[in-house]
Image (spheres, rainbow, N blue to C red):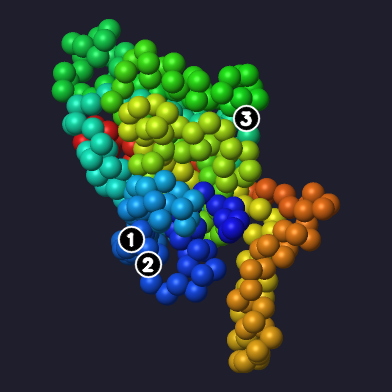
Amino acid sequence: MINFNTDLAVERNDIYRKANNIANDIEGIETQNQEIDDKINISRVKITNEKGAEAIGKPIGNYITIDIKKLKVADNNEIQKAAETVTKELKELIDKHTEKQGDILIVGLGNIYVTPDSLGPKVVKDIDITRHLLKYAPEYIDPQTRTIAAIAPGVLGTTGIETMEIIQGIVENIKPKLVIVIDSLSSKSIERISSTVQIADTGIVPGAGVGNARNEISQNTLKIPVIAIGVPMVVEAATIASDSIDLFIEKLQQDAKSNDYLNELKNVNKYEMIKEALAPKDYNLIVTPKEIDDLIENMKDVIARGINFAIQD
C-alpha cells in the first residue's frame, strides 16, 4: 500500500502513477492543467468512480490545485490576481452545489496560537459576515445579499470538543445550505508550502496529512455540501531530505552529464528510505519555513478575498 503523506490530490495522483509506471490518467481519474500566467498554474483532478478513489485514497469529486509562484514576495496586485483565480474556481463549485442566495457557513479550522495552523482562523477574521446585519439591521443592506456566517471553532486540545461536534451543532441550528472549511494541509513538496491552494467539493479530514486525523467534515457527516479550501503549510523532514537529494543529483548530473548510479538513485522512493532512517530517533519532524508569518499573511489575503468575491458575486 502506498504511503502518500500528503493532503493534495494532485500529488497523490502523481505518486500513484509513478509507483505503478502509469504514463496517462489513472482509471477513474481525469486530470487537466491550465497555465494562467508565468506565476499561476491550475491543476484539476476529478475522481469519477470508486476505482479512482481507492487508487489515491480520496473521495469521488473535484480537486482544483492553484499553484502560485513567489507568493512570499508578492505585491498587492499579484495577491489580488491570485485571489481572483481562487474566486473563479470557488464560485463554480459554489454554484454547482447551492442556489445563488443559499446561506453559507464558513469555518476556519486550526489553532490561532500555532502559526502554521492559524490560516483558517485568520481567514475568518477577514470574511464579510452578513447574517447578523440581515437579521438586525436589514435597512442598511441589500436584501439580495447572501447570508454568511463564520466561525473559528479552535482545536480539540484547547476546547476539549471535537471540531465536528461544534460544526454539527451550528449547522443544526442555523441551517446553512453549504459549508466552506479552510484548513492548513501537508504536502510532499517544499515548493508548495504556502504557495498552493487546493479547493475540493469533497470535504476534509482535519489532520489527516500529519497522522492526526480527526472526524470527517463532509456531506456524509453534515448532510449538506462541504467545500474545503486548504493550503500546505508543513512538510516532513524526510520530504525535505528527499527533495534536497534530488536537487543535489540534478546538480551532479549537470556537471557529469551522465551517471547511471545517480539516475537510478533519483528514480527510487527516497522518501520512504529516509523516513525509515529518521523514525527510530523521532527525527522525522514536521517542518515549516522561517518566513511562515509573511507567507500566512499573504495567503490569508488571497483566500479571504477569493471567498468574499465568490460568495457575493
Looking at the image, is mark 1 or mark 3 earlier in the sequence? 1
Residue type at the position of mark 2: Asp
Q: Dot 1: what SS?
A: strand
Quarter of the image with the N terminus is: bottom right
Q: Residue at x 40, y 56 (%)?
A: 52
Report which quarter residue 116 is drawn in. Answer: top right
**In this image, 112 relative to 148: left or right?**
right
How far apart are labels 1 and 3 at the CA level? Answer: 39 Å
Say whether residue 39 is visible. Answer: yes
The residue beneath circle 3 is: 113
Residue that label 2 marks: 25
Residue sitting nearer the eye, 296 or 204: 204
Q: CA distance from mark 2 to mark 1?
A: 6 Å
Q: Are marks 3 and 2 in contact (CB under 8 Å)?
A: no
For residue 120, which numbered disc appears in the image?
Answer: none
> Measured from the top left, where is residue 138 in percent x and y?
21, 11
From mark 3 to mark 2, how far is it between C-alphas?
41 Å
* Residue 149 in the image: above or below residue 42: above
**Residue neighbourhood size for the residue with mark 2, other residues' Cα within 10 Å, grouped as few (<14), some (14–19), many (≥20):** some
The residue to which callout 1 is attached is 30
Horizontal and vertical percent position of residue 262? 67, 83
In this view, the residue farthest toward the bottom is 257
Residue 251 in sight in this render: no
Does dot 3 land on a helix, a strand or a loop?
Answer: loop
Residue 303 spot, x, y in % from top left: 40, 41
User: Dot 1: few (<14), some (14–19), or many (≥20) neighbours within 10 Å?
Assistant: some
- Asked if marks 2 and 1 touch (Cβ < 8 Å), the reply is yes
What type is the residue that disc 1 sits on?
A: Glu
Labels 3 and 2: the sequence-earlier one: 2
